[in-house]
Image (tube, rainbow, N blue to C red):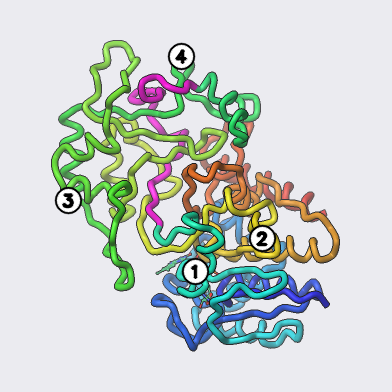
Amino acid sequence: MAEVTIVGGGLAGCEAAWQLAQRGLSVTLIEMKPAQISPAHSTPLLAELVCSNSLRSDDATTPAGLLKAELRQLDSLIIACADATRVPAGDALAVDRHAFSRLVTTRIALLPQIRLVRCALDRIPEGPVILAGGPLVGAGLAREIRRLAGDRLYFYDAIAPIVDAATIDWSYAFRASRYGKRHASDARASDARWGKAPRASPEEGGREGPPGMEGDYVNCPLSEVEYRAFVDEVRRGRKVAPKTFEEPRYFEGCLPIEVMADRGDDVLAFGPMKPVGLDDPRPGAAHPYAVVQLRAENRYGTSYNMVGFQTRLAYPEQKRIFSLIPALRHAEFVRYGSIHRNSYLHSPSLLDEELRLRTQPRVRFAGQITGVEGYIESTAIGLLCARFVADRLAGKTPSPPPPTTAIGGLYHHLVRARQPGEPFSPMNVNFGLLPPLLERAKKRDRRTLHAERAKMALASWLQ
Ligand SMILES: Cc1cc2nc3c(=O)[nH]c(=O)nc-3n(C[C@H](O)[C@H](O)[C@H](O)COP(=O)(O)OP(=O)(O)OC[C@H]3O[C@@H](n4cnc5c(N)ncnc54)[C@H](O)[C@@H]3O)c2cc1C
């Protein structure tokens, strides 16, 4: 039997170990607890849920519900244990956290193919290895990973919110690049020149905004009165307090918007909201006092991130305060902004399509450290990584999951080609990661259509 070593007995590591064992492979699973314990963990059990006991919605027409439905079909250990220990929580799959982790620990311990070793590893072991040390990976191993990944291993998330493009009010927005640079018409040619994945053409379902406006950014202008009211609310808004183990030491180039707002009335207007080089082309429009810029988050242009808008504002406050920006008054958020401690890689430039380190292909990564976020997302990447390893060891070429599935959307977010310096931020599962539907439909129906399309794609992939 070929032997694979997995470092980290969290959600991704346990899922990967289980998947490999089911395929007859021998696994050494290394977990540092209880000898060494991260500031968020508190028990010696495997697959510990460090915060909420909810794995989110179980309705298959929501992104989280769809991902869980797919994981069930893929014989996930984590979801099976969650189903077996669920507690009443409406549409959500919530679990008795101790019963859940105990069950995962027992099922792993009972498998003869898995050898569980309790020690903190600070060297990368020999042979095929999956590193699944999670968002708070032990310091020794983090140093080793940093030696391989350089400054492309990050220790903090500073995430800007993402807006559903269909909910932008285009009568208050205009498309343009600063000083008119790099118009959309030549952007595709430029992408090709730099070896980037090409953005989708309208025929492939890509969205380009209203005709007559071109440019890489969607700009949301504010008058001086609107800007001042916005800054006041950002200052006043409720913020999420850092955890005791999170020292909020911010980089000057990546400050939260509330820190900038506190530093002075016009700091945001000279920072991420600066309007220079952005003329509003709409007839009769005055030059904006400030501008929120939105940049496409995917090649289809179905979701946009708010550039430079990392924030610790509480989620309901983000919804309330960002709706003061006229173009975002009805906006729906695919993801809210946040700042927290989180070790993750710039996976698109470091990992190949099998989640292998390009410079050392025997080393793979799984779980949150790859740049997904959340219990089920980390589980999904653990599962995929194990399938890739098992296929390779069986002499087969792994086939990636289709991008129209929830698991495929997450996976493609990690491996879509990007240059080393290009922005990449961790992601929860959401429909913005999937190619847009080709048919027009109401929001409620869109969710059902996404779920149906994903189900068919998963079935043909599994065949
Ligand atoms: C404070 C906090 C709150 C969170 N709240 C939520 C939430 O409410 N909902 C949600 O969906 N997600 C939440 N997350 C994210 C969630 O914890 C992760 O998505 C998920 O646990 C990641 O799974 P993983 O297997 O990649 O890592 P983990 O589950 O963290 O597992 C990693 C394992 O590796 C072990 N390990 C680390 N380094 C070494 C080493 N050198 N040698 C041996 N073992 C090692 C660790 O002890 C741990 O058991 C939260 C994260 C944090 C930090």
Q: Which mark is residue 212?
A: 4
Query: Gap between marks 1 and 4, in whole Å?
Result: 49 Å
Residue depicted at x 66% and y 45%: 403
Queried on whether the Cβ of the residue with tag 3 lies below 8 angstroms from ligand 1, the answer reads no
Q: Give the secondary structure at mark 2.
A: strand
Q: Is residue 99 visible?
A: no
**Amino acid type at mark 4:** Gly
Mark 2 surroundings: few (<14), some (14-19) or many (≥20) residues within 10 A = few
Residue depicted at x 60% and y 84%: 105
**Lateral position of residue 243 relative to residue 384, left or right:** left
**Lateral position of residue 131 relative to residue 177, left or right:** right
**Amino acid type at mark 3:** Arg
Q: Nearer the viewer, residue 320 or 136?
A: 136
Mark 3 surroundings: few (<14), some (14-19) or many (≥20) residues within 10 A = some
Give the mark toward the camera: 3 or 2: 2
Q: Nearer the viewer, residue 434 or 320?
A: 434
Say which label, 1 or 3, has the lower sequence index: 1
> Residue 58, relative to residue 334: is it above or below?
below
Residue named by callout 1: 142
Query: Gap between marks 3 and 2, in whole Å?
Result: 49 Å
Residue placed furthest toward the front: 147
Residue named by callout 2: 360
Q: Are marks 1 and 3 in contact (CB under 8 Å)?
A: no
**Amino acid type at mark 2:** Gln
Say which label, 4 or 2, has the lower sequence index: 4
